[in-house]
Image (tube, rainbow, N blue to C red):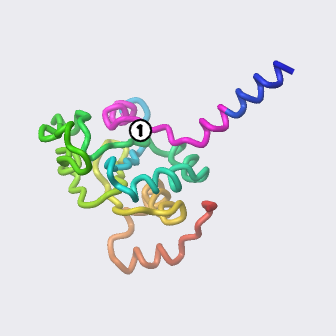
């Protein structure tokens, strides 16, 4: 009976882990790209942002999103008002104006500023060499995020150079992610 309980606990913890995106830092993702090139998917959030929390709870715990992101991207979680130092394109980005005593909004990290992040949450895509592809601003359901995840992963975004091309792509896209 004890062995059965141990097995049950092990399986439950394995299942719980498999339902989580394996977040890393931007520095770790850029380092991983040197060994195995993969695109980067970055969640840019702030601690005070309600839609960011909703995205984390609903979208980033959806089994289809978790599976697709973990398999095809280096997932990065980045606090746009945090203190993490980011080494990107031979420059160290910091947040020198961060105030640890401030409640709520804080100063924007220089890396978020360099990415031209204008709202939260934002999801930012980078190619296999760490070059910026595009940000996607705002809360997205799993089905709304799916088109961006798959379009960027498959490089279809390179063919979508006009508004009409995007509209056609969007209209013909068939979602497979479950609620």
**Residue, x 38% and y 49% (percent of image)?**
43
Q: Does residue 58 belong to the magenta stretch?
A: no
Q: Give the residue furthest to the right.
A: 1
Judged left or right of residue 67, residue 73 is left
Q: Residues within 10 Å of mark 1 (few under 14, many from 20)?
A: some
Q: How many marks?
A: 1
Outermost residue on the top side: it is 2
Instruction: Please state the extent of the stretch shown in magenta in the rendering.
Output: 13-33
Q: Residue at x 24, y 46 (%)?
A: 103
9 relative to 65 in the view: left or right: right
Q: Residue furthest bottom?
A: 164
> Which percent across, then down, holds residue 3?
82, 19
Quadrant of the image occupied by residue 94: top left
Residue 1, quarter of picture:
top right
Q: Position of residue 155 (x, y in %)?
A: 43, 57
The structure residue drawn at horizontal position 32% and vertical position 57%, both measured from the top left corner, is 120
Q: Residue furthest left?
A: 97
The residue nearer to you, when weighing 21 against 130, is 21
Q: Which residue is mark 1?
A: 37
Task: Tell whether 162 sits left or right of 109.
Answer: right
22 in the magenta segment = yes
Q: Secondary structure at mark 1?
A: loop
Q: Is residue 72 left or right of residue 76?
A: right
The picture places residue 63, in percent across and down from the top left corner, at 61, 50
x and y, in percent, of residue 82 in the image: 26, 40
Name the quadrant of the C terminus.
bottom right
Magenta span: predominant SS is helix
- Residue at 47% from the left image edge and 73% from the top image edge: 169
Q: Nearer the viewer, residue 129 or 30?
A: 30
């Amino acid at each position: 009976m004890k062995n059965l309980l141990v097995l049950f606990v092990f399986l439950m913890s394995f299942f719980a882990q498999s339902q989580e995106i394996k977040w890393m830092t931007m520095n770790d993702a850029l380092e991983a790209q040197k060994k195995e090139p993969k695109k980067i998917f970055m969640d840019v959030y702030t601690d005070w942002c309600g839609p960011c929390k909703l995205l984390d709870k609903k979208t980033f715990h959806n089994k289809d999103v978790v599976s697709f992101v973990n398999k095809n991207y280096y997932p990065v979680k980045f606090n746009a008002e945090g203190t993490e130092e980011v080494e990107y394109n031979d420059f160290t980005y910091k947040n020198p104006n961060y105030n640890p005593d401030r409640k709520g909004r804080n100063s924007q990290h220089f890396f978020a500023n360099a990415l031209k992040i204008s709202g939260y949450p934002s999801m930012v895509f980078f190619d296999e060499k760490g070059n910026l592809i595009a940000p996607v601003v705002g809360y997205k359901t799993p089905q709304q995020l799916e088109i961006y995840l798959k379009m960027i992963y498959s490089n279809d975004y390179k063919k979508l150079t006009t508004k009409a091309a995007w509209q056609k792509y969007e209209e013909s896209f068939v979602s497979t992610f479950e609620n």
